[in-house]
Every structure is written in C-alpha cells, then in structure tokens.
Amino acid sequence: MPKKIVLAYSGGLDTSVILKWLQVKYQCPVVTFTADLGQGEELSPVKGKAQSLGVEEIFIEDLREEFVRDYVYPMFRANAIYEGTYFLGTAIARPLIAKRQIEIANIVGADAVAHGATGKGNDQVRFELGYYANKHDIKVISPWREWELNSRNDLINFAEKYQIPIAKDKRGEAPFSTDANLLHTSSEGKVLEDPWLEAPEYVYSRTKSLENSKEEPEEIIVSFKSGDAVAINNNSLKPHEVLSKLNSYGYEHGIGREDIVENRFVGMKSRGIYETPGGTILAKAHRAIESITLDRGEAHLKDELMPKYSEVIYNGLWFSSERVALQNLIDSTQSNVNGDVKLKLFKGNVIVMGRRSPNSKYDLSMVSFDEKGDYDQRDAEGFIKINSLRLKNFNKK
C-alpha cells in the first residue's frame, strides 16, 4: 500500500472522483498537482476544491513558459507532425506533467503517483512511461484500469455518495471530451465518434469558422533565432508569448482546424477534432526559414527522420535515448536558422510571402536568368550523364 500519492488534478469531476477514490481505497494522504499549460481555464477554484476534499498539500504551477520553451519548441525544430496532420499537442504535454509529478513526489516524500487517463487512450502510456523514466521504482496508480466506475452515471453516483460538488453542466453524458493547452485543443467521443458526420460548430473553441473569420487578409513577420521563433512584427517575446500571439492570429483567421482519424498506440483508430492555430502558423514559418538556411542534405535528412521523431513522441517516449539522440542531431542543424518570414493569414490559409536571413544559402547569382552569374549551364551535362548510367544499364535489352 502506498504511503502518499501525488495526483495530476484538474479540479473537474473525473479527477475529483479519482481523488476521493484514492483516499477511500488507499487510506493515505493524496497530494494534488495542477499545471497551467495554457488550457484557458480559470485555475483559482482548484485549490478550494482540493481543500474541500481534505487535501492538505496542493501544488498549482504556471508551466506555460517551460512547456513551450523546453517541449513545444524542440518539437517544432524537427517539424514534427504525426501521420501527416497531427501536431502532437496532447502527446507533448504529458512528459512535462509526469516529470513535475515525480519532482513533487520527491519533495513531499510520496511513493506513488496517479493520473486520470482512461484505459482506452494513449495518455495512460505517456504518463506512465514518463513516471518510470524519471523514477524507476515509483508506484503508479491508474484508477480507470482498477475501479468499477465504468460510466458517467457511475461517476456521478460516486460523487453524490461522497458529497463531491457537481456542476449542473456535468450531469448526464457530456457530448464530447476535450483536452487543451497552449498548443492545441483536441476533442473526441460521443457526437464525434462517427467519422462520416461533420463535427458540430460548438466543438470548436480556439478558431473561428471560415464563414465568420476576418474578411481581410493580415500580414505578419515571424523572426527566428537558432530555429526558434523569438519575435512577431519586430516585437521580442518569450516562447509562450509567441505561441499565445500566434494563437490569437489563428483564431481570428480560422487557421488550424483538423479532423483526424489517427492510429492510437494502444491498438485502435480514433476520430478527433484538433485546433492548433498558433502551431499551424509557426510550422509554416519554420519551414520557410529553413528553406533558405539549410543545406539540401540537412533538410532532407531532417525530413527523413521527422516521422520517426513524431512517432517517438506520440508513443510517450520523450525521455528515451532515441528521442535525445534525434533531438541532438536536429538541434545541430538549427544554428543558422535565423531570420524573418513574412506571412499572409486569410480564411484558414497561412501563405508565405517572403523570407530573409543573414545566413541564407540562396544565391541569386546562381539562379538568375538575367545574367550569366556563377553557374555554367554546360556543367549540367556531365552530372546528367553520370546519373543516367544506371538507367541506361537497367533498360538494356
């Protein structure tokens, strides 16, 4: 039996029920940890909710800057995207929460941690791999795999039995569930389960519909230093401020909606609705600045590694040796990724208008058709002949 448990606690119905269930089942103190990752919810009531359930040690921390600086930005240096569409917004948040839970467990002398992820999803994997990577002998408790509360009504009945307050909008079955942080929102379940049916407009919260988005295009300039966005329109910003500002642009212009059926690590397909407004803009801008600052071999190598890197993060292996090795290689390509990208935002589109860099490898004298420049077109003949040898041999009768 554990002596003390640190719970990843949101203050919502599910984790409040989990909190009381842990207290009842294990008869030991439970410490709550709530991270502000930019989910957009007011966190001030969380402390009161935890106190009302008898919690004495409560941690509520603003981790937005660490989240973007140390997790989102490294991922975007890799141009990471899972299965061609998913910006990994949920997957990249779990390692930070897991790491901090273990740190808090060490501070308060807890020998166990718990989370609110269900037994059907990827998050249970991501949380628990993160726990074990940071403390190999920690006891991990996954209530959704252990208890008998298998429906919304079961949760509500448990809450009523132990006098856990239930918001009026939490009674009955929720139409869908949502995870949110500064990078994205993801929604799934109930009204979204049929992949043929269009998602209702009320599912979206971070982006305006194309019909209601701005009627005039807007141009912005995103500046980069060593592969990371550091300024917008010449105004220097911290990493989380950059993403917040890009989110506001994306919201107004209806940028970043994705309707995805993804292949979960746990062995099923899942339909989800994702909004990544700022991330969509940032990804396009980063690609644009890399186009003039990376050598072709570097760029193509990164593109070859990107699917593997994305899969590693999706599967919860942020703290693995292979992710660190890939990150070191990726980061070694970014020292010259400096400069500005000019973008036009309009009706869901992110359009590159221009790019410039003090480290540009774009040589006008090589590409210009207006003057001889430094490229002798006759040099191409030998290159073509050498590369044609294998084709000639392959097609010999």
Image (spheres, rainbow, N blue to C red):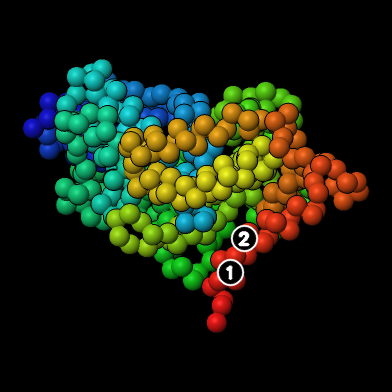
Q: Residue 142, position in %: x, y?
A: 21, 43
Q: What residue is drawn where x is 55% and y is 71%?
A: 393
Element on which disc 1 rests: helix
Neighbour tally class for label 1: few under 14, some 14-19, many 20 plus, Cα within 10 Å: few
Relative to 162, is 25 on the left or the right? Answer: left
**Which residue is at the far bottom?**
397
Q: Residue 43, position in %: x, y?
A: 44, 30
* Number of callouts: 2
Q: Please state, as top left, top right, bottom left or bottom right, where the C terminus lies in the image.
A: bottom right
In-front residue for pair 29/220: 220
Estimate the spatial distance between the alpha carbons at disc 1 and disc 2, rounded to whole Å: 8 Å
Element on which disc 2 rests: helix
Relative to 134, is 327 on the left or the right? Answer: right
Q: Which residue is mark 1?
A: 391
Question: Residue 264 shows which numbered tag?
Answer: none
**Which residue is at the far left?**
1
The reply to whether residue 23 is visible in this rendering is no
When the figure is inspected, residue 301 is found, relative to residue 338, above or below; the finding is below
Q: What residue is drawn where x is 75% and y is 52%?
A: 379
Q: Amino acid at mark 2?
A: Asn
Q: Amino acid at mark 1?
A: Leu
Q: Residue 153, position in %: x, y?
A: 27, 54
Cβ–Cβ below 8 Å for labels 1 and 2? Answer: yes
Question: Residue 387 shows which numbered tag?
Answer: 2
